[in-house]
Amino acid sequence: MKSLLMKKILVIVLFLAIAGELFSQASAPLNKRISYTTDAYPLHRAQKALTDVIVHDIFSPPVASRIYVYANMAAFECLAAGDHNLGSLHGQLSKFPAIPAPGKEVVSSVAAIHAFFNTAKQLVFSEKRLMDSAAAVLKWYKTKSVGPKQLAASEAYGKLVSDSILKWVAADNYKETRRMKRYNLLKQPGTWLPTPPGYMAAIEPHWNKIRPIALDSAAQCKPAPPTRFATDSSSAFYKEAIEVWQTGKQLSTEQIAIASFWDCNPFFLNTQGHLNFATKKISPGGHWMLITALVCRQKLADIKTSAAAYTIVSAAIFDGFISCWDEKYRSHLVRPETFINSNIDESWRPLLQTPPFPEYPSGHSVISTAAAGVLTSIFGDNFAFDDSTELEYGLPVRHFRSFKEACDEAAISRLYGGIHYRPAIENGQTQGRQVGEIVLQKLKLNR
């Protein structure tokens, strides 16, 4: 009897111990709950570190999108090589390299972080700043008792993956576009002119030469042409400019908040007398990458799910900029600030600084809609979230009931900000929706 009683007591104690452990894991924060092999905590830190360097180095929105997508591809491929449930980009993208399977000592999550940073450091200016962050992020694995042999093998494998992908990256025509001629002003009625306060030269006029990820060509999602330019007060174009002008003169507090929240202008220039200095901000793509981080954390997504989300969102943003810039330098359309000052009100100024490139279509409308479509496919419709990405830039959190609501607000913010006519916003969203759909059709990251 005593033996039986002792066995029953032992079973009860064991049950309580297991239940306590399960409860402990369920109530623990993300970086405590999941094994270090699947925990996305280091990847989220890596994304933020890269964003900080992109902001510091003041990369243009298109160039920033290139940095994001290649760094995330490298991380994802490390994970896909060791997991048959993930679909490698090899065979999905033209000439994308085949990645060898990792050795038994390799911890794929550690290798992914190494690959992310090794790729990104080749694409930014502040390499030391980025790699200091990498060292801090990777130190986390040492607290999880990852052995020296595993760390060394994982680092070597991450570098192997990164080096393979960087060879593919080198053929995307980016270097060639650095040697192309600067933009020449057309000096024709209705075409783009530099705007105050910096009167900067046009940014990335040859970006449509960059190889897309999922699109067949830069012109695949070519939007309807912009409204025909005219200065006649009865013309459709003049009425579009009047809408921008009138909206800018009677903005509500909420409209000002929306425009400011989605400004995302890395070129913002402060002018005080003869002193000019930049205020560094995230790009539109950077904003959506941070939203991706927010929702991955909210869903407690593991590193594989998070890496797939980062990769496909960054691909949609990257292709969105290529598609958008293709049209910008086809239509060369004048910005509202220039037209309104010349034809309606010479003293009018938009709420936001006008970015240094042609007006049509709205880049934020294109890439926000593309990113939102991809995120909706991953996390579903009506996924509510609090967007805190602008807190460090002095702006409050905004709540959204869905990714669509967020991208619609980002798009209309350009009208409130006075930097786009309505067709650039509406047709830009149509264009972005098409880009997102093609990315989802082309890239199958989960089997």
Image (spheres, helix red, strand yellow):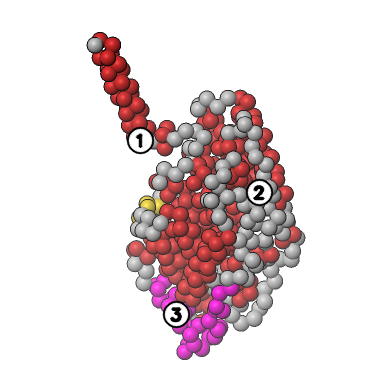
Q: Nearer the viewer, residue 88 or 241?
A: 88
Q: Is residue 386 left or right of residue 307?
A: left
Q: Quadrant of residue 188?
A: bottom right
Task: Tell me which amino acid carries mark 1.
Answer: Ala
Q: Is residue 60 above or below residue 79?
A: below
Q: Quadrant of residue 102?
A: top right
Mark 2: secondary structure: loop
Mark 3: secondary structure: helix
Q: Earlier in the sequence, mark 2 or mark 3?
A: 2
Q: Earlier in the sequence, mark 2 or mark 1?
A: 1
User: Label 3: which residue?
Assistant: 242
Residue at 50% across, 67% down? 433
Quarter of the image where the N terminus is located: top left
Whether residue 87 can be seen here: yes
Mark 1 residue crowding within 10 angstroms, few (<14) / some (14–19) / many (20+): few
Q: Nearer the viewer, residue 193 or 439?
A: 439
Q: Position of residue 73 (x, y in %)?
A: 60, 49
Q: Identify the magenta region.
A: 222-249
Q: Depth-wise, is mark 2 or mark 1 nearer the camera?
A: 1
User: Label 1: which residue?
Assistant: 26
Q: Position of residue 431 (x, y in %)?
A: 53, 70
Q: Earlier in the sequence, mark 3 or mark 1?
A: 1
User: Label 2: which residue?
Assistant: 123
Q: Nearer the viewer, residue 101 or 388?
A: 101
Q: Is residue 278 magenta?
A: no
Whether residue 59 can be seen here: no
Q: Is residue 157 above or below residue 365?
A: above
Q: Is residue 170 above or below residue 99?
A: below
Q: Is residue 121 left or right of residue 19?
A: right
Q: Is residue 229 magenta?
A: yes
> Where residue 409 is drawn, which disc sits there?
none
Task: Tell me which amino acid carries mark 3.
Answer: Ile
